[in-house]
Amino acid sequence: MPGLYFMGIDLGTTSVKISIALNGKQVASVSQPTKADTKSSVGSAGFEQDVAIILSTVQSCMKELSPETLSSVKKICITGQMHGVVLWCSKHLNKFYIQENNAFNVQHTSRLYTWQDQRCSAEFLTSLPKPCSHLPLSTGHGNATLFWLSRYQPDFLTSFDRAGTIMDFLICVLCGLEFPITSNQLAASWGYFDSSTGCWNKEILGQKSFPFHLLPQVLNPGEKAGTLQFDWFSIKKGTPVLVALGDTQCAVYSVLSNPDEAVLNLGTSCQMAFPEFLETVPTFPESSSPVQFFPYFNNQYLAVAASLNGGNVLSQFVSMLQNWIAAFGCVKSKEDIWKTLLESSPKTNKNENPIKIHPTIFGERHAPSQYGKVSGITASNMDLHSVFNALCKGIIENITRMVSPSYLKQKGVKKLLGTGSVIHKNPIIQREVMTQYGDIDVELGRECDSAFGAALFCEATDSS
């Protein structure tokens, strides 16, 4: 019977995943890495991705799903990496997809400036007008990036008349939308968005000649953005597509089953999150607070402590080791390095003061000038495995400084669900989560899945 399934698509930082759900269960899924990172014109401060590669990966995932499954898709919900921004020119909209070849033809767009982008310095951010929002503005936020482009690359901006997240762009192409539409979840992640009124800070942005005409229209989660304007593989033209959602919200939605649960998701970055009703939304942010409140579902907010330091720190460490080894003329794959790190134990004497690592090498949004440091080094605790253990421990200690076990208890949290690829694959991280959050019931092994969460929410909005 056609029209049974609900599709969730996650355009993540490092991969694309598609999930097909029915009756709250995942019936099919496929995932592929994007490998879309590209060099930035601003050097190491810029984190940019190739839009064409991301959408090509979407197509590759679609090809792995059977025509029978795709022909039964009733509704689509797209989620993905928050904060980032891509620009395009609307007059080329009908050229972005070649129906005869069933392929994207992405030209006349900017690169995707991702959430990891560091071009907006603290000095630059303080020069911007103060937002009317309960969320602070940080580098990597869409509107901060647009401010930067308008100040330093104004001629570049004149090539475009639309902006949105990568998910908003995909929806525009699929649905033939002349003007982008986003959700309040994603708008809040860009900055200069008042969640209590559901509106952009138009008057504030207008004071600084901000390119306000680029900003998308904002809808609530569950509202329809449009319908497919062509058959997409075996999914029929006219299939509804919901407004795009934040990947953090969808990831949490995929695993939470009770109101007294919190999620610790450790992947590329690290997030601690739990839903909460807010009677009033603050007018201005507490910029020094590590916990922020993002629009969630059903008029709730999601309390989120989003660390910029997670699996990316461990990946950086492995890359560093690989480079050091190469400097001596040796070749070692990252896979081999990971195997060595995860299978061995530290040689440090248990009675000795261990090395301590604060692994905040990417800074933190609530403390942008806070970077990594190492202390407690002795002649006997600098072996590779002691350092790696200290690094893993430091990552979890960093999140406990942001959200302590006592804070979770105060908020009524009784159970902590540990999810994410880093927790699943790294027994040292698992041990540290169990140890440092030992005052709360901890369950490891749940699969936090933004694509599945989008599919579940898509099904939850279905009234037929």
Image (spheres, rainbow, N blue to C red):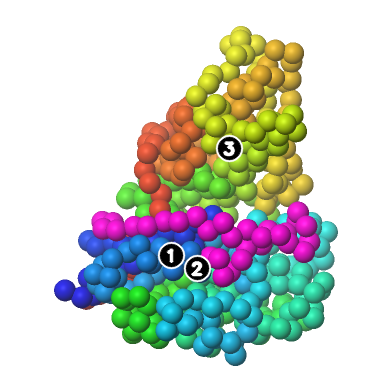
- When the figure is inspected, residue 365 is found, relative to residue 48, above or below; the finding is above
Question: Can see residue 264?
Answer: no
At label 2, which amino acid type do we have?
A: Ser
Secondary structure at badge 3 equals: helix
Residue closest to the eye, 282 or 31: 31
Q: Which residues are magenta?
A: 25-54
Residue at the (62%, 14%) spot, across then down? 348
Q: Which residue is mark 1?
A: 60
Asked whether 92 or 434 is in front, the reply is 92
Real-space Cα distance between discs 3 and 2?
A: 26 Å
Tell me if residue 316 comes above or below residue 74 in the rendering.
above
Asked if the residues shown at circle 1 and circle 3 are in contact, with their CB atoms under 8 angstroms apart, the answer is no
- Circle 2 Cα neighbour tier, 10 Å, few/some/many (<14 / 14–19 / ≥20): some
Going from the N terminus, do you reach mark 3 or mark 2 first?
Answer: 2
Q: Are marks 3 and 2 in contact (CB under 8 Å)?
A: no
For label 1, count other residues whose C-alpha is less than 10 Å away and answer few (under 14), some (14-19) or many (20+).
Answer: some
Quote the CA–CA distance across marks 1 and 2: 6 Å
* 147 or 199, nearer to the observer: 147
Q: Secondary structure at mark 1?
A: helix
Amino acid beneath label 1: Ser
Q: Quadrant of residue 110?
A: bottom right
| Amino acid type at mark 3 | Lys
Q: CA distance from mark 1 to mark 3?
A: 26 Å
Mark closest to the chain's N terminus, 1 or 3: 1
Give the number of the disc on residue 80.
none
Residue assigned mark 3: 334
* Image side of residue 105 versus residue 358, left or right: left
Which residue, given by chain and number where applicable, does mark 2 sit on? Answer: 56
